[in-house]
Amino acid sequence: MLGEEARQYVRELTEVLAALDLGRVKVFYQKWGKAMELPPMPDDARLEEDMYLMILELPGLAHLHHAAQEWLLARGRAVDIHEVNCGKMDGPSAGQGGCGPGNGRCGCR
């Protein structure tokens, strides 16, 4: 079960990512980096790529998944939403419950 701080982190992360604004992602990273023991902030290019990868990991941002996939594909990074949400990639939602309708992930089966 997530503590209140972790729930607040996820709420804020979801809001920041939904804005598709790298500046807001940087502010978020600076705010939460120490508390959540994040690695040092990457350069802008890597942080922007990470922003789109994180969008794919959050079911609450499903309305942005296609745009995120397109952004990544345009930069030579093919990512299958199934791999992100069904446990084949690293990330906060990877490996949690597999596929299937009603589990809050891709619903591929």
Image: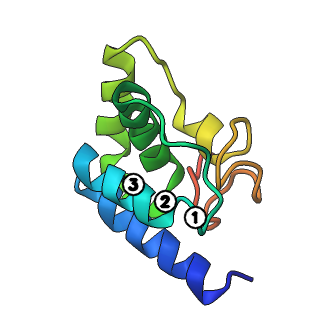
Image x and y of residue 20, in percent: 24, 48
- Count residues near mark 3 (Cα–Cα under 10 Å), then give few for <14, some for 14-19, many for 20+: some
Give the residue type that dot 2 points to.
Pro
> Residue shown at 39%/71% (left/top)?
12
Looking at the picture, tell me which residue is in the foreground, 101 or 39. 39
- The residue to which callout 3 is attached is 62
Is residue 21 something one can see in this rendering?
A: no
Q: Are marks 2 and 3 in contact (CB under 8 Å)?
A: yes
State which tag comes first along the sequence, 3 or 1: 3
In this orientation, which residue lies closer to the viewer: 9 or 58? 9
Q: Which mark is on residue 104?
A: 1
Label 3, secondary structure: give it.
Answer: helix
Disc 1 marks a residue whose amino acid type is: Gly
Residue drawn at x 32%, y 67% is: 15
Crowding at mark 1 (Cα within 10 Å: few <14, some 14-19, many 20+)? some
- Is 66 in front, or is 7? 7
**Residue under circle 2?**
59
